[in-house]
Amino acid sequence: MDAPPFLAARLDRGAAPLVVGDVIALILLLTVGTLNHTTVEFLTANPLYLPGVYAPFLIGWAAVAPLVGAYSAGAVETAKSSVPLVIRSWIPAAAVGLALRAFVFRGGAELTFAAVMLVLGSLALGGWRALYFRLR
């Protein structure tokens, strides 16, 4: 069964490395952020804590990024096209993640946390993609 035309235009097979890198970048960002507020001992004693931190933002990313075009043919061409697409995808994806965190998962969506997630998520995703295209 083929993807619907709308989604088919936004998903390119060549974007598979971008998918992997984006998820790794988000997990690293969220892990470092968590370690700024807790200890390794706490995380070791509570192995489900980090997945609970990752889940709202990865769900938001999975729901929004393909729709905005983070994995479209344009995203695979150059850093000049890919970086703006990933940042434009992150902004609404982070909003979804913050809403999920506030209403479904543990945690909150305080204004300062939201600002940090928007800025650092944009830097992490945009920086990773810029590096990818430089090394490719």
Image: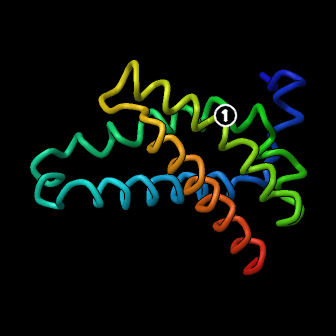
Residue 41 placement (x, y as % from top left): 11, 59
Q: Quadrant of the C terminus?
A: bottom right
Q: Quadrant of residue 65?
A: top right
- Tell me which residue sits at (49%, 25%) in the image: 99
Q: Up-down: is 79 above or below 91?
A: below
Instruction: Report the side of 42 relative to 14 (left or right).
Output: left
Give the residue pinned by disc 1. Answer: 92
Residue 72 placement (x, y as % from top left): 84, 45
Q: From the viewer's side, name the closer residue of 126 and 14.
A: 126
Instruction: Report the side of 105 relative to 69 (left or right).
Output: left
Q: From the viewer's side, name the closer residue of 12 and 110.
A: 110
Q: Quadrant of residue 61?
A: top right
Q: Quadrant of the N terminus?
A: top right
- Tell me which residue sits at (49%, 32%) in the image: 98
Residue 6 placement (x, y as % from top left): 87, 25
Amino acid type shown at disc 1: Pro
Instruction: Report the side of 79 relative to 105 (left or right).
Output: right
Secondary element under disc 1, as helix, strand or loop, is helix
